[in-house]
Structure formats: C-alpha cells, structure tokens
Amino acid sequence: MKKFNLLVVLVFSFGSLFIAGCDKDDDDNPVNPVPVVAPILTIEMDHLAGTQKFYLDSTYTNANGDEFTPDLFKYYISNIRLIRNDNSEYAIPESYFLVNHAAPGSMKIMIDSLAQGAFTSVKFLLGVDSTRNVSGAQTGALDPVNGMFWTWNTGYIFLKLEGTSPEIPTSAQTFTYHIGGFSGQNINYKQVTLDFDGDVLLLANNKNPELHIVVDVLEIFKNPTTIDMSTFSSTIMSPGPNATIIADNYADIFKYDHIHND
C-alpha cells in the first residue's frame, strides 16, 4: 500500500513539473497575432493663391493684373485611383468628395477600408463623371442639397468660384463662376494625374499615411487663357464656351507636394 501511495505521489509530482514546464515555455513564447486593420488614407488639399495662403475675403492679383476678392470656393474630387510602379491601378470605390474652403474639414479627404500596396502616383477627376450626372437623386457629397447641382439635364456644378473685383464693369462688381458640363461640346470635368516625384505612398496594415496636394486658385485665371476680368463674362451659370475656357484653365490647379507615411 505504501509503495502504491509513493508511486501516485511520484506520478503526480512528475505531471506537475511537466505542466509547469509547459506553462513556462508558453510564457516565454507568447502568441500575440497582429490585428489586421485596413489602412486609412488622408488626402489633404492645401489651397494657395500663387505662393500665398488662400483665404476667403482676402484680395489677390491674377495673371492679367486684376485684383479680386473671393468669397466662395468649392469643387468636386471623384474617381480616385492610385497607381503602382508597374502602372497598374487601384480604383477606390465610391470616391466622390466635395471640397469647400469655408468648411476646413472637407479639405482633408479621409478614405478607409483600403487595400495594401505601394503607389507612385494618383489620378482623379476634378468634377463628376457622366454616369453620376444622369443617375437621379443621390446622397452624401452628391446630394443636391449641397448646392452643386443644376438639373437632371445639365447635371453637377464641378467648381464654384465667386467674389468681387474692381475690374468688373457692373455696379456690384461681382463675379460668379459656376462650371459644369458633361456631354457634347461641354465636357468640363478634368482628368488629373499627379506623379509623386520618386516618393512612394505606402498603404500597409494599421497605417494612416497622408498625401498633400497643393491647389493654386490663380491657375483658374490663366493657362491656356489669361482671363481679363474687365471683358470676360462675370456670370457663368451653365455649360457653354466661357465655362469651357475656365475648365481648361482649372485642369492644372493641382500639384503634388509631399507624403507622410505614418
């Protein structure tokens, strides 16, 4: 009986040591899997007037030498695509954003649930594509309540710039540029492609990089057509030749600035 009890004690002791050893090994080699969190990209629009910071209700001089004071500036960014080094594209779905200088939060476009990858350039539209112009009532950035929609026939306003200028020969001296048009002779949304100048945008697990883009408002008044505010139409509120002149000018208001890979 004593021998049996001794055997039980020995077996129990050995088992306890074995379990303790296993526990120690587990402590030495903990399994802590890295959680998968999709990258979030912030695209920040830095509004300038030439080399100056752009502010509403401040006065600037355009390429023609005309002074003007803006009091409204807003535009659509849509159909964002990130380009890899091999020129393959990652299209970000449902990427429609309204940037309004009077609402600073809108100048930081945040996009979540993104795929991972390394990218060397970006493409997007200034404006809204033809399909969405004829798709009926929509929500979010494309909701007509945002004041950027004419009718189902003429579609969305892609860019608005309003203000005053002493050069304008009217008593109010105001200008109203509402630019849109998506068909026929009046296709005024513009494809923008920005190379990152050798930099790489990294979308990786649980990372939140920032892409900074400069938007030069003075470009709206020049290249390819220098706008003389004393003779150019001060009121553009539908597609047509004058809207197309402005649209051709605003095709190059965007410039790549820098990337923060967080």
Image: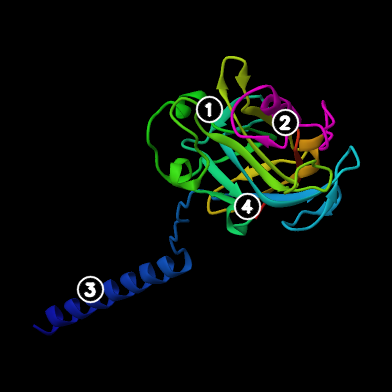
Is residue 260 in sight in this rendering? no
Task: Determine whether, in the image, residue 7 is placed left or right of residue 130.
Answer: left
Residues marked 2 and 3 touching at CB (< 8 Å): no
Q: Secondary structure at mark 4?
A: helix
Where residue 113 appears, as percent x and y from the top left, is: 47, 46
**Which residue is farthest left?**
1
Which residue position is annotated with label 1? Answer: 129
The residue identified by callout 2 is 246
Is residue 33 in view from this perspective? Answer: yes
Where, by quadrant of the figure, is residue 14 drawn? Answer: bottom left
- Label 4 crowd bin: few (<14), some (14–19), many (20+), radius 10 Å: many
Residue picked out by circle 4: 107
Which segment did they paint magenta? Answer: 222-249
In the image, farthest residue toward the right: 65
Q: Rounded to the nearest whole Å, what is the CA distance between mark 1 and mark 3?
A: 77 Å
Asked whether the residues under the numbered discs 4 and 1 touch, taking CB atoms below 8 Å apart as contact, a structural biologist would say no
